[in-house]
Image (cartoon, coloured by chain):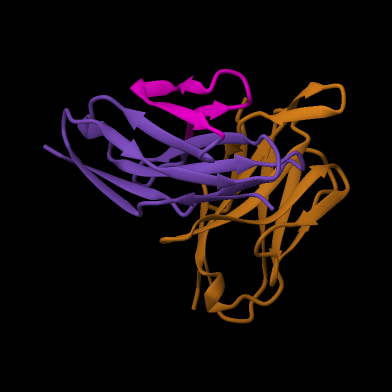
Chain colours: A orange, B purple
Amino acid sequence: NAGVTQTPKFRVLKTGQSMTLLCAQDMNHEYMYWYRQDPGMGLRLIHYSVGEGTTAKGEVPDGYNVSRLKKQNFLLGLESAAPSQTSVYFCASSYPEGGGGWTTNEKLFFGSGTQLSVL
Amino acid sequence: AQSVTQLDSHVSVSEGTPVLLRCNYSSSYSPSLFWYVQHPNKGLQLLLKYTSAATLVKGINGFEAEFKKSETSFHLTKPSAHMSDAAEYFCVVATTGNQFYFGTGTSLTVIP
């Protein structure tokens, strides 16, 4: 099993350009997430998905769009890149445990990150 | 709303001395709490998690954390620091909506 795979690992964009980051997981996890990591700010949740065909906004969704057309893939799009989007992006997946109307969260499985620079 | 506050952005300890990294959480119900570690230029690794079982949670590499509901705290400790413990540590709270929220991180420096 490869786990969580992110592509690309590095990218440089000019302001206004668009791009898509791909996240793929082979663990059959229901939940997938996109985070950005900036110095002194920890990881902030951009968007997440609780299943195929569903997405939801996190803490910092502006300027990003996502899609989850297949369970194993979660795409993060930047339609018009801005320098403020220079960051390291992490994808993660997870699955719930428990039942009876109450679930707890198993740990997050992370990809290796994408370093994005917007000039 | 759920959130975590890591009270120290930087902590320095001497090798062989105890480590204490502080985390307070805010949650309207009993949360799931985690500590993750990120070594320089590496990905994130789970140290330990709390999910309403025992309040003292033991993790990898000799770390443990104690959940104190009355203090809304989940501090991370280790009796004796090792040089390899130098890293960024993140306290994380998870909601029943399956959202994971990270603290801003504590950078641990271990002085030889």
Towards the viewer: B72 or B56: B72
Q: Residue at position x 30%, y 52% from top?
A: B10
Q: Is residue B5 above or below residue A29?
A: below
Residue B110: image quadrant is top left
Q: Where is residue B86 drawn, in percent x and y?
A: 27, 40
Residue B99 pos. (x, y %):
69, 45
Give left or right: position of A114 versus B77: right
In the rendered structure, the answer to whether residue A103 lies left or right of residue A18 reads right
Q: Nearer the viewer, residue B51 or B111?
A: B51
**Magenta-colored stretch includes residue B60:** yes
Question: Which residue is outermost to the front?
Answer: B70
Q: Nearer the viewer, residue A41 or A23?
A: A41
At a point 48% along the width and 21% down the height, the residue shown is: B56
Residue A114 in sight: yes
Looking at the image, the residue that sits furthest to the bottom is A16
Q: Is residue B74 left or right of residue A67?
A: left
- Asked if residue A111 can be seen in this view, the reply is no
The quarter of the image holding the N terminus of chain A is: top right
Is A73 drawn above or below residue B54 in the view shown?
below
Q: Which residues are magenta?
A: B45-69
Where residue A81 sits in the image (x, y, percent)?
62, 75
The percent coordinates of residue A71 (x first, y second) are 81, 39
* Magenta run includes residue B34: no
